[in-house]
Image (cartoon, helix red, strand yellow):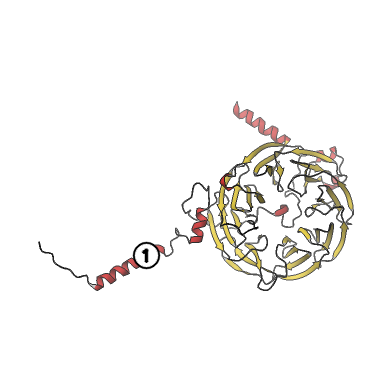
Amino acid sequence: MEYESRQVKWYWLLLFILFCSGVVYLLFSGNPYLYSHHELRSALSVGDVSQRQTIPSRPQAPEKLSPPTFYSRFNFERTAMEPGTSPRSRVYLEHEHNVVNMGDSAFEVQNVSGDSSGFYLSGKSPWVLAVGLDGKVRWRYKFIELPAERALLPVLLDDHSAYLMHPTGDLVALSKTDGRIRWVLDLAQEVVANPFIYGNDLMVPVKAEKSGIQLIRVQRGNGKLEGLTPRMDVKPQFSVSRAGADTLIFAADNKVSAFDTTDWRPVWTQTLTDPVKGPAVVVDNQIFVSTLGAKIVKMDVKKGKVEWETDLEKPAASPPAYLPIMHKLSFLDTSGALVTVDAKTGKSVWRYGIENRNPLVESWSARLKGTNIEEFKMDWLHKGWTIWSPCSERRFCIYTPGKGQLIQRVPLSGSPIALPISLDKRLVFFTQSKPGQYVVSQAVEEAEIKRLKAEEAKASD
């Protein structure tokens, strides 16, 4: 049999190469299902570590951005005043508690953010966990490993998204409901303080070129860089509070500074004798700070002038909580005692040794119902504002602000770690029952528990 020899024409080979190049270009160009290596790693890190997910389709960014749903100390002014105006009952019982199954991503919780959707946990581990109010882990996300002695930053929240941040500048926005990726951004810069939400942007603090800091503005709807603020003469690891529509108060080391956010220029800077503990507390035109030198200091918002400072028996363990109308401050000191101070004069009103032995060292203020005002002979003028605080071990207590009278002691299944999520007729605590074991505890008004039990009985009939 004879075979006819055939010669491959050069133009056929050229056409074949051009065809393959076109196919490869169309496959990789603008394909929404393909991720960069950074996004691919992030996508595979969502969900249970034992079940690697396929690359998720990206949810649509929300059409309208909502305000933050979580603030440290209940609000951006950091006053530790419970949100909402509805008064509460004094009788609470732990109606439900659920142990959190941390799975393979167990770690020591350092930061707890929370809203009505649940708790969002981070710490000295590359994992971030979303835990429902029922104590069940809804999703997990894993970053790259952390640098030595560093921790993941607190999770920021709005209605739709959870914003996760690595100290090396790795930012991820996830859907709060299922943990799916909305966007990923690598700033490739060290984050030097806790980021915060301001308007439509995430404000991420990084070191300025020579000294001080700058804030990188990231559009939280789509993860796009919006710009960089001018250099600010603020030390890293600052805390920030809001004072009016266009003013932010920065507290770092022994300096408190006000900045106008229209141009990010300083309005004033006040240097104190001792370092400040935590963020400044802003009430109208007043600023209150705790210092490590066992002082509470009051300043004026407009000029930063010190109006008074009071010496304490022991340093405050946290910034003070503000009690409105009666104009008082409450706080736990480093010995575990509960203290109140007159916010007008700075004079100590009373100090009560409650021996707090919980990780949570902050008090907060909330209102009681009229029946409780009568029962404990409180002044009607002050509308039932009372002091709520962790006390002894695995408990929180309610006290009258005038004399420190104990109104109620509520046992929990664990020691509170953070301020509770405030819901109608209930407070939800994230607690620790023993090292490495965490519990979500729901303290519910007694009348509400009776109603729930009646409904359960009726449903079972």
The answer to whether residue 109 is left or right of residue 332 is left
Total labels drawn = 1
Quick one: 386 or 108, which is closer to the camera?
108
**Residue located at (60% from left, 49% from top):** 129
Which residue is denoted by mark 1 in the rendering?
Answer: 24
SS category of the residue bearing label 1: helix
Determine the residue located farthest toward the left in the rendered image.
1
**Percent position of residue 11, x then y:** 25, 73
Quick one: 7 or 157, which is closer to the camera?
7
Amino acid under label 1?
A: Val
Vertical position of residue 416 compared to residue 95: above or below: below
**Residue located at (61% from left, 44% from top):** 132
Quadrant location of the C terminus in the rendered image = top right
**Percent position of residue 287, x then y:** 80, 60
Tell me, yes or no, if residue 59 can be seen here: no
**Percent position of residue 6, x then y:** 17, 68
**Within 10 angstroms of label 1, few (less than 14), some, or many (20 or more) residues?**
few
- Quarter of the rendering containing residue 168: bottom right
